[in-house]
Amino acid sequence: MKRRDFLVRSAGSAGALAAAPALLAAAPRAAGAAEYATVSATPKAAKRFGDGRDWFFDARFGMFVHWGLYAIHGFHEQEQWRARVPRAEYVKLAGQWNPVKFDANAWLDLVEAAGMKYICLTTKHHDGFCLWDTKQTAFNTMNTPYGKDVVRPLADACHRRGVPLCLYYSIADWNQPNYPNEGRHHELPPQPGDSPDWMKYLEFLKAQVRELCTNYGEIHGFWWDMNVPKHVDRSINAMIRQLQPKAVINNRGFDDGDFGTPERDYDQKAGDAAGFERPTEACQSVGMESWGYRKDEDYYTDRHLMRSIDAYLARDANYLLNVGPSGEGVIPAGAAAILRRIGAWHAKVREAFDGVQPASQLTSNRNVLLTRRGNTIYVHLHKDPAGDAVKLKPLATLPVRATLLNTGKPVDCAVTMVPSDHAEQKAYLRIHGLPANELANSVMVVKLEFDRDPAAGPVAKDSGAVKEEQK
């Protein structure tokens, strides 16, 4: 499809869109996303696996990359579906696929700058176009002007630099003739010339998964998406585990997998949960409209992304933040700048996420999250603070040192009774004088160092309504 034709189709398709309200209602990829995370009523650390997959709990923060033919027009990774592009037109984009500026090391440089520790690439999205040298379909990067495998150089660069590589694979496929496209959410309507056969399609899928798990050295994760038929087949994940024992597998495939996947802000229960019953990896894109490259993308604010990242990392979950490279293979400057700014923030507060335990049960203040390492407590102001002070009721022990990690400067603390606690006539730990206005576009994290267990209560000199300023 010519660019001009695509713009006309996108801008003038109101009638087509109005005729398909059910499709639009299902537009968020995580429709029904409550199934993607199992929440807990109390803060807790996610259970470890006790094997090679435990790299996942040390890495914590990773880069998601949505990349494919859809980057050429720069509309959306689901261009074929959302813009109602006929398959015969969409497949012609393969003749334009030539990402000559793709540089795996440049991507990994950005991973490092953002403070990320692993990367996950979409090897095949819903459109069915494959970024590797697959023998199962001609609809792949080898049969394009580019003519090169994309997964190979990324895998090689990851191995050289010690960056765990995870691979995304869409179960829904808008190109493979055996996939039963029935017009369900994230599916095309039945296509002319198709021969729907779910079992044949599964054989195709298994052969592709085997290629990905045997041809690129060690991989560390397999990220399924869009099991529209909700088919269960535990043998497929078993094959992945046999071939790649260090690979963590998400819960969007053919069984429950290893971890949950709350997406964007769709899953309110996961967003508000005190903790998670099983390992969890939240995912979000820097772009508000698309996961793939969009030429005129609207970006989330740094603050919105930092708040989301902090909220999940502080609850012992992982976080996968997405960018969409252009058709040339370059991560857009706007997206890259966001990642670098987030990386600068993350570098300053990272100690509040690494090697800690969720500890929000220590306070009744639900506007903050706490993490803990021994007698050190980290206070995460992941929600917009209403003022320049934070009260950590019922904690009433004064720390020996309090530091705002964002600046490295000390902050004031006191154990005092404030007017709003007059009914109880008790003093509680209060952090005050925070630069809330100056750091309004960030997420503040305060480090409190105690000389004893802060939950054990104050000694006599800290008790009552006597104010003790930090020395």
Image (cartoon, helix red, strand yellow):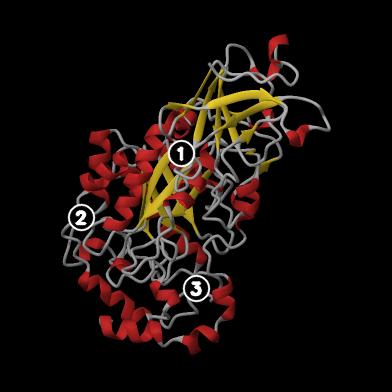
Mark 3, secondary structure of its residue: loop
Would you place residue 110 above or below residue 10 in this image?
A: above
Q: Amino acid at mark 1?
A: Arg
The amino acid type found where label 3 is placed reads Asn
Front-lying residue, 398 or 139 = 398
Nearer-N-terminus badge (2/3):
2
Residue that numbered label 2 is attached to? 102
- The residue at the point 40 percent across, 42 percent down is 62
Relative to residue 72, is residue 447 depicted above or below? above
Instruction: List the residue tagged with mark 1.
Output: 241
Q: Earlier in the sequence, mark 1 or mark 3?
A: 3
Disc 1/disc 3 C-alpha distance (Å): 29 Å
- Percent x, y of residue 87: 37, 79
Mark 1, residues whose alpha carbon is within 10 Å: few (<14), some, or many (≥20)?
some
Residue 78 falls in image quadrant: bottom left
From the viewer's perspective, is the residue at label 2 or at label 1 nearer?
2
Disc 3 designates what residue?
181
Estimate the x, y position of residue 338 in percent, counting from the top left. Answer: 35, 51
- Mark 3 Cα shell of 10 Å, populated few (<14), some (14-19), many (≥20): many
Answer yes or no: do the residues labelled 2 and 1 have beta carbons within 8 Å? no
Rate crowding at label 2 as few (under 14), some (14 to 19) or many (20 or more) other CA atoms within 10 Å. Answer: some
In the displayed structure, does residue 216 sit left or right of residue 290? left
Quarter where residue 363 is shown: top right
Amino acid at the residue labelled 2: Phe
Please give left or right for residue 469 compared with residue 108 in the image. Answer: right
Residue 7 at x, y = what percent? Answer: 33, 82
In the rendered structure, the answer to whether residue 59 lies left or right of residue 155 reads right
Q: What quarter of the picture does the N terminus occupy?
A: bottom left
Residue at horizontal 40 percent and vertical 32 percent from the top: 407
From mark 2 to mark 3, how far is it between C-alphas? 32 Å
